[in-house]
Image: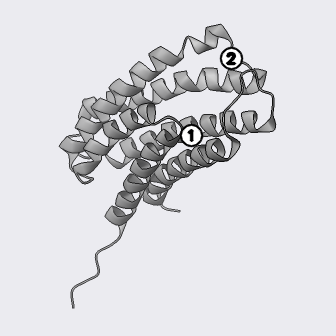
C-alpha cells in the first residue's frame, strides 16, 4: 500500500468510526452512568474509537500537506492542538470505559480537550485553505463539523463523519494518475 493510500485510508477510518458511534447511540439509546448494560460499554468504546481515529486522520491530513507551501507552522501547530485536544478527551472516555463510571479527575480534562481541539480545528482549516491541496470547502467543513458535532447531540457524530469522508475521497482523487492524452 502506497503512503498516499494510507493517508486517504485514515480519514475513511475516522468517518467509519463516527458513523459507528452514531449507529451505536441510535440503536442502544441513552447511555447510563454508571454503566448498567453492554450497550453502555459499546457506546463508550465507539466514542473512544472515534477519538483515536480522528487523531490518526488529522495526522494523515498533515502528512498530505507536508511538502506544500501554505500549510507551514500554522498547520503543524493546528494538527498538534487538534490531536492533543482529542487525546485529552480520550483520557476520560477510556477511564469511563474501563471503570464503567465517570470519575471526577479525568472528567476535568474534557473542557481543556475541547478547547484545544477547537483551536486546532480552526488552525488546520486555515492551513488547508492556504495550502490549496484540497478544495477550499474543506476549510469550511472542518470547523462547521466541530460545531455541529457539539450541537446536534447523538446525530452530531455524522458531521465529522461526512467531513472525514470528503477528505478521504479528495485525498484519493488527488493521488490518481492522470491518463495520458492520446
- Label 1 belongs to which residue? 50
Q: Residue furthest front?
A: 29
Give the x, y percent position of residue 143.
Answer: 32, 36
Nearer to us: label 2 or label 1: 2
In primary-sequence order, the first of circles 2 and 1 is 1
Using residue 100 as the reference point, say whether residue 105 is left or right of it.
Answer: left
> Which residue does the image show at 47% across and 48% down from the upper left?
161
* Quarter holding residue 36: top right
Where does the image place residue 27, in percent across and percent down from the top left? Answer: 67, 47
Compute the Cα span from label 2 to label 1. 19 Å
Residue underneath mark 2: 102
Q: Position of residue 79 (x, y in %)?
A: 38, 33
- In the rendered view, tell whether residue 163 sits above or below residue 146: below
Few, some or many C-alpha atoms within 10 Å of disc 1 (few <14, some 14-19, many ≥20)? many
The quadrant of the picture occupied by the C terminus is: bottom left
Q: Is residue 53 left or right of residue 173?
A: right
Residue at 56%, 10% in the rendered image: 108
Pick the front one: 144 or 51 = 144
Residue at 56% x, 40% y is 50
Q: Is residue 180 visible?
A: yes
Q: Which corner quadrant of the image does residue 130 belong to?
A: top left
Name the spot of residue 107 as percent of width and height, x first.
Answer: 60, 14
Disc 2 secondary structure class: loop
**Discs 2, 1 touching: Cβ within 8 Å:** no
Amino acid at each position: 500500500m502506497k503512503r498516499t493510500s494510507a493517508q486517504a485510508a485514515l480519514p475513511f477510518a475516522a468517518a467509519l468510526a463516527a458513523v459507528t458511534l452514531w449507529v451505536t447511540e441510535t440503536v442502544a439509546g441513552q447511555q447510563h452512568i454508571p454503566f448498567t448494560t453492554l450497550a453502555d460499554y459499546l457506546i463508550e468504546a465507539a466514542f473512544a474509537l472515534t477519538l483515536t481515529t480522528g487523531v490518526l486522520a488529522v495526522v494523515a491530513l498533515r502528512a498530505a500537506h507536508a511538502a506544500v507551501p501554505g500549510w507551514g507552522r500554522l498547520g503543524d501547530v493546528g494538527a498538534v492542538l487538534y490531536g492533543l485536544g482529542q487525546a485529552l478527551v480520550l483520557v476520560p472516555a477510556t477511564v469511563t470505559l474501563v471503570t464503567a463510571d465517570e470519575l471526577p479527575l479525568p472528567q476535568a480534562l474534557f473542557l481543556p480537550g475541547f478547547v484545544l481541539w477547537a483551536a486546532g480545528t480552526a488552525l488546520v482549516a486555515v492551513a488547508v485553505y492556504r495550502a490549496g491541496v484540497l478544495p477550499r470547502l474543506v476549510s469550511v467543513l472542518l470547523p462547521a463539523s466541530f460545531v455541529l458535532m457539539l450541537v446536534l447531540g447523538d446525530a452530531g457524530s455524522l458531521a465529522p463523519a461526512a467531513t472525514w469522508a470528503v477528505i478521504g475521497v479528495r485525498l484519493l482523487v488527488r493521488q490518481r494518475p492522470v491518463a495520458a492524452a492520446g
